[in-house]
Amino acid sequence: MNILIITQVYFPDTASVSQHLTDLAEHLVSKGHSVEVISSLFGYDKDEVYTKKYNQNGVLITRVRNTNFKKKYFFSRAINFLSFNLAVCVNLAVRWRSVDLVLGTTVPPFSALIGLTYSKIKKIPFCFWVMDLQPELAIASGLIKKKSIVAKFFKVLGDFIIRKSSKLISLDRFMTDYLIQRGASSSKISQIPVWPVSEGFFDGIRSENPFRIQHNYADKIVIMFSGNHAHVHPLNTLLETALRLKDDQRFLFAFVGGGVRKKEVTAFRLKYKLSNIVQHEFQPRSTFHIAIAASDIQVVVLGNGQVGFTHPNKVYGAMFLGKPILYIGPKSSHITDILSKIHGNVMIMHNEIDLLILKLLNFAESYEDTDFITGQKNQEYAKVNFSPNILMDQMVSALESSKS
């Protein structure tokens, strides 16, 4: 098949959507399919300008020019999204390459409508890979009001895309149920979680980890939040815990990555003069596994009211790399579905600061056994259930079935 993918983020962007789309596109090529990606000329989280058209591991990448305002404010981000969608429309209007299937995602919001419209004009299937659901996620994150005109408009638009797509890829059972509530036919849904994106493992001993040495972690128990500090990842529980534990020299709270909430972490650290909080930039995919291995427990956060609307996937990478998990979020979610099967991980709800402190103190008391045994069990579970090749093969099958 000749497959067209529409996405604002793609290699070498470090966003999760970019990494998973890159993996899938190259896997499709390895299976004999022809793949073209339409993406943005600009880096998503950095001031990078990419080559307009080139071939990357068999995938033809076409870059379109859109606005590149700073992502500090919601309005400027919205303008960037809108201009990207308009640039894609122009590209599709003048393109001559034949296409057998269009794959769209939720990045940027409602770009899937463009792919869907194009597929209807060309009378070809449109597959919608649902990474999150709007406007529900924006409402749950406090970005827009539930009864606003904007929310109602986006709801109608989203329902249309969901109903008219030839195939929907859902990430978990909660998302699947909600897609059906919004009008999706269950026969059109394939439920496939995303896969770990680490390119390697760190098998050395803890004290010799290059990231630990570089940042002088010494023998501290490192509690790490790594990835995009997005609106959907409220960090107040973790930050308040760090404040309460500021005099306990055993603990260090590391925040790795960027995003709109990064400034909240910085402001909190400076306000309370916390030496037990450190911040680092996004790590390249090639060395991501070394940074994760430098931690002793990995943090996964899901906001209240967001179950089924978004799917934090850092849990897969952390488990795959053999790390215990600290989950902060609603009691029932795709993350608790996984962690409840494995003893030793820490699960709390937002604002349960006293409970989190108690669990971290217990973790510290039995650190060596807990860290090794829980991490090993997590890794074993991830290798069986979240193997990249198995999940990517499932994705390929789902796309191929939409053509039949």
Image (cartoon, rainbow, N blue to C red):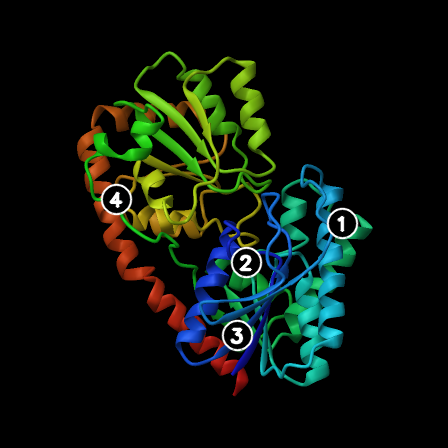
Left or right: where 316 falls relative to 402: left
Labelled pair 3, 4 in contact (Cβ < 8 Å)? no
Residue pictured at 60% horizontal, 71% vertical: 184
The kind of secondary structure element at disc 2 is loop
Residue position for label 2: 10
Report x, y in % for residue 140: 63, 44
Looking at the image, is mark 4 or mark 1 earlier in the sequence?
1
Q: Is residue 9 visible?
A: yes
Find residue 388 and report its image quarter. bottom left
Indicate whether 189 appears above or below 32.
above
Q: Decide which of 351, 401 is in the foreground and name it.
A: 401
In this orientation, which residue lies closer to the viewer: 342 or 46?
46
Q: Position of residue 321 (x, y in %)?
A: 29, 47
- Dot 4: what SS? loop
Q: Residue at x 44, y 75 (%)?
A: 29
Residue 336 in view? no
The answer for how far apart the CA atoms under marks 3 and 2 are is 13 Å
Name the amino acid, label 2: Tyr
Nearer mark to the viewer, of 1 and 3: 3
Which of 197 and 214 lies nearest the eye of the viewer? 214
Give the residue number, with chain letter if any, for mark 3.
Answer: 35
- Residue 121, quarter of picture: bottom right
Of callouts 1 and 3, the N-terminal one: 3
**What kind of residue is marked 3?**
Val
Q: Earlier in the sequence, mark 3 or mark 4?
A: 3
Q: Is residue 6 left or right of residue 381?
A: right
Task: Give the distance between the C-alpha atoms of the residues marked 1 and 3, in whole angstroms.
Answer: 28 Å
